[in-house]
Image: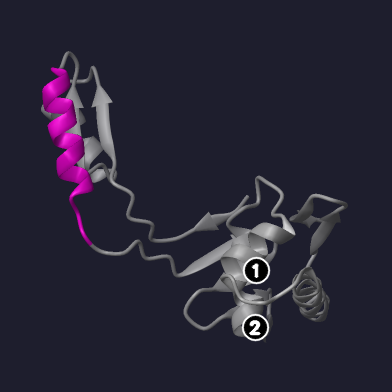
Amino acid sequence: MCSSDLISTPVLMLTARTSTEDKVSGLDAGADDYMTKPFEAAELLARLRALTRRTGDISVEESTFGDLTLDMATHDLSCGAHTVHLSGKEFEVMRLLMSSTARVVSKRDLLDRVWNDTEASENSVEAYVSFLRKKMKHIESKVQITTLRMLGYRLEVIE
């Protein structure tokens, strides 16, 4: 449901396919390393350490859910040809909801992760969810923020 582009998660292929053609095919398909069975645990651990030593940020340019696209660089929320710019807090709330589509996001979680221990209250969360709902309606999205009483919020596609 939610997809992101340009995530640089390291990939290690573990397989019984041992031909050079299979190895080349796996590496060309995007694997960062390729190990064939049987293998020694010490070698597997060393290869995992090597893959995770990489420095650099994971680069995500946009996130999508249903007909919505959130541009991480510009803070624009789009649906088809319609686009609206989000404020800083609106963007952070939407980013968190779009990255958590498989679960409910509680008000407490939003307060902790978006407002970072400021004196904000649950009313702040409710206000920003309301702002987002209006903007989503304005760009004619079929996605809505659903309130689950006593639990929190989640995104849903409404047909």
Residue position for label 2: 86
Mark 1 lies on a secondary structure that is: helix
State the image coordinates of residue 52 (x, y, percent, origin top left): 23, 46
Give the vertical position of 9 relative to 88 (above or below): above
State the image coordinates of residue 20 (x, y, percent, origin top left): 11, 28
**Residue 155: image tag:** none
Instruction: Report whether residue 79 is seen.
Output: yes
Mark 2 lies on a secondary structure that is: loop
Is 48 contained in the magenta span?
yes
Q: Which of 48 and 82 is in front in this view?
A: 48
Q: Residues within 10 Å of mark 2 (few under 14, many from 20)?
A: many
Q: Are marks 1 and 2 in contact (CB under 8 Å)?
A: yes
State the extent of the magenta-drawn residues as a range. 40-55
Separation of disc 1 and disc 2 at Cα?
A: 9 Å
**Main secondary structure type of the part rendered in magenta:** helix
At x 81%, y 81%, the residue is 138
At x 51%, y 68%, the residue is 62
